[in-house]
Each structure stands twice: as C-alpha cells, then as structure tokens.
Image: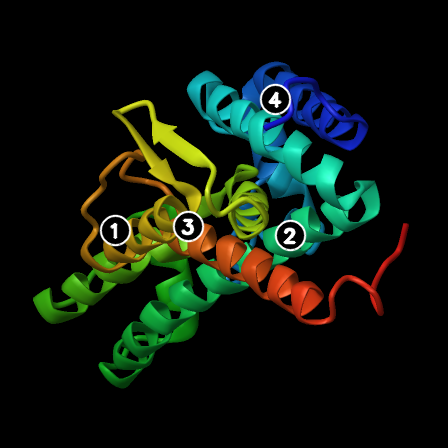
C-alpha cells in the first residue's frame, strides 16, 4: 500500500473537512445539516442536490476521522494504480450506488406500511402531519399507531458520510490486491483482502436485516455500504473483463 497521499484523495479530504467545519459552525450545525444531508425523498427537507452533498458530510469527529483515514489508506493506493480519473469515477459512482441501495431499502420498508395506513382510513396529509410534528392526531387507534412508529424513522431518516464511496474504493482495492492483508482496529488479525472485504459486506447485510451492529454505530446506513461496495465491484469487474483497454481514460 502507498504511504503518501495522492492528489485527488488530498482534495477530497480537504472538501470533507471544509464541509465538516460548516456543519459545526453554520446555523449551529442544524441548518447546514438540513441543507446538505440526504433526507428521505418523501420528507419536505429533501432536495435533489443532497444526493451529492451528503457524500461530503459527516455526523461527528469520529465519523469523519475514520472515513478520512480509510480514504487516505485505500484511496491513495487505488488512485496510484488506476489514475485520478478512474479513481474519481469509482468514488462518485459508489456514492450514487450507495444512495440507490439505501433509498431502495427505505422504500421497500416504507411503501407497504404507508399503503396499510391509507387503507386503515388515514389520509396522506394526516400521515405527513404526524411524521412532521411527531404528534399523534386524535382518533388514531393502536394498530395505526404501531404502523406510524414503524414508518416514522424512515420518513425522518437522514444520511451523511463518505462511507458508500469508500466502500466502493475498498472493493476496488481488494480486486486489485487480493493477497494484501488487512486488519480491523477491533479485530487485530491480518486477513487477506479477498476474504476481508466480502466479510465486511456480509456483516453490513446482516446488520441491515437484523439491526444488530457489529463494528459500526447502530444508526449506520448499512445498505449504503453494500451499494457502494457492489458498485465498485461491478465497475472493476467490467474494466478487468475488458483488460482496461477499451475504457482507458488516462
């Protein structure tokens, strides 16, 4: 793995740090977060630009430190091997793949609940009002309340972080360096990348389905990790299949 920092990785880290400072200082952090975090599209706080801006936002010091460390460690190696254009293409594509997977997972869970609420007699404005104010309207029965409690965290969910992008870079690194030995801070045992990276992705899938967190905070967007990694894998698989010839940009 390369020891220095490559040009594109350096600029990405700078952008992330600037955005993090903005989160801490502008509008007591809350306003900046509302502008640039990614909200569930049904929520009034959602804006199209958040699909991109959330990739450069972070929820806390630990969050940004871990992500920027991973970006430096794996991103510099990948950029050195692929070049800046291919690296940035994978990075941003993985971010979009993360959005697609996470929002798809949200909709998969939200839409059946919403349909059931409508069938139970509630109107769309009533549902939106309760989700927005977090206050239950008079006349809501226990069955409806249970459904509302299940859908409320999805409607009000927000997503920030470069994790999806970095998972795509991690997948690319693993495909180019399958024998490289990696370790988790919480599991200091060297494991080859060809086993380590699929293992991390599998843990994210299990966490998304069960809600059981292994190495990440419980509010992690696990399916975003899966989407980012899968996107990185598909891109690298396609390039490798074509031997980097037909798609060489450098």
Residue 27 in which image quadrant: top right
- Residue nearer the viewer, 97 or 242: 242
Q: Residue at x 60, y 41 (%)?
A: 54
Q: Are marks 3 and 2 in contact (CB under 8 Å)?
A: no
How far apart, in angstroms, are the residues tagged by discs 3 and 4?
33 Å
- Going from N to C along the chain, the mark reached first, 4 or 2, is 4
Query: Looking at the image, is mark 1 or mark 2 nearer the viewer?
Result: 1
Question: Which numbered disc, 3 or 2, marks the residue closer to the eye?
Answer: 3
Mark 4 vs mark 2, CA separation in Å: 17 Å
**Mark 1 → mark 2, Cα distance in angstroms:** 23 Å
Q: Which residue is mark 2?
A: 51
Name the residue beneath numbered marker 4: 20
Of pointers 1 and 4, the one earlier in the residue sequence: 4
Depth order, front residue of 179/160: 179
Q: Which residue is mark 1?
A: 207
Q: First in sequence: mark 1 or mark 3?
A: 3
Q: How is the image coloured?
A: rainbow
């Amino acid at each position: 793995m390369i020891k220095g920092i490559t040009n594109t990785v350096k600029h990405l880290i700078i952008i992330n740090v600037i955005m993090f400072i903005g989160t801490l200082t502008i509008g007591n952090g809350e306003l900046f977060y509302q502008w640039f975090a990614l909200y569930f599209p049904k929520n009034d706080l959602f804006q199209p630009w958040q699909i991109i801006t959330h990739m450069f936002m972070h929820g806390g010091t630990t969050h940004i430190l871990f992500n920027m460390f991973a970006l430096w460690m794996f991103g510099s190696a990948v950029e050195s091997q692929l070049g800046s254009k291919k690296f940035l293409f994978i990075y941003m594509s993985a971010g979009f793949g993360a959005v697609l997977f996470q929002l798809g997972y949200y909709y998969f869970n939200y839409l059946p609940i919403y349909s059931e609420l409508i069938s139970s007699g509630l109107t769309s404005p009533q549902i939106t009002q309760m989700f927005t104010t977090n206050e239950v309207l008079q006349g809501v029965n226990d069955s409806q309340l249970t459904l509302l409690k299940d859908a409320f965290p999805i409607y009000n969910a927000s997503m920030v972080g470069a994790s999806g992008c970095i998972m795509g870079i991690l997948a690319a690194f693993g495909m180019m360096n399958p024998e490289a030995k990696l370790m988790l801070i919480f599991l200091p045992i060297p494991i080859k990348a060809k086993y380590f990276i699929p293992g991390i992705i599998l843990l994210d899938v299990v966490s998304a389905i069960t809600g059981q967190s292994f190495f990440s905070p419980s509010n992690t967007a696990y399916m975003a990790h899966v989407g980012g990694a899968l996107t990185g894998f598909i891109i690298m698989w396609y390039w490798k299949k074509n031997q980097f010839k037909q798609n060489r940009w450098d």
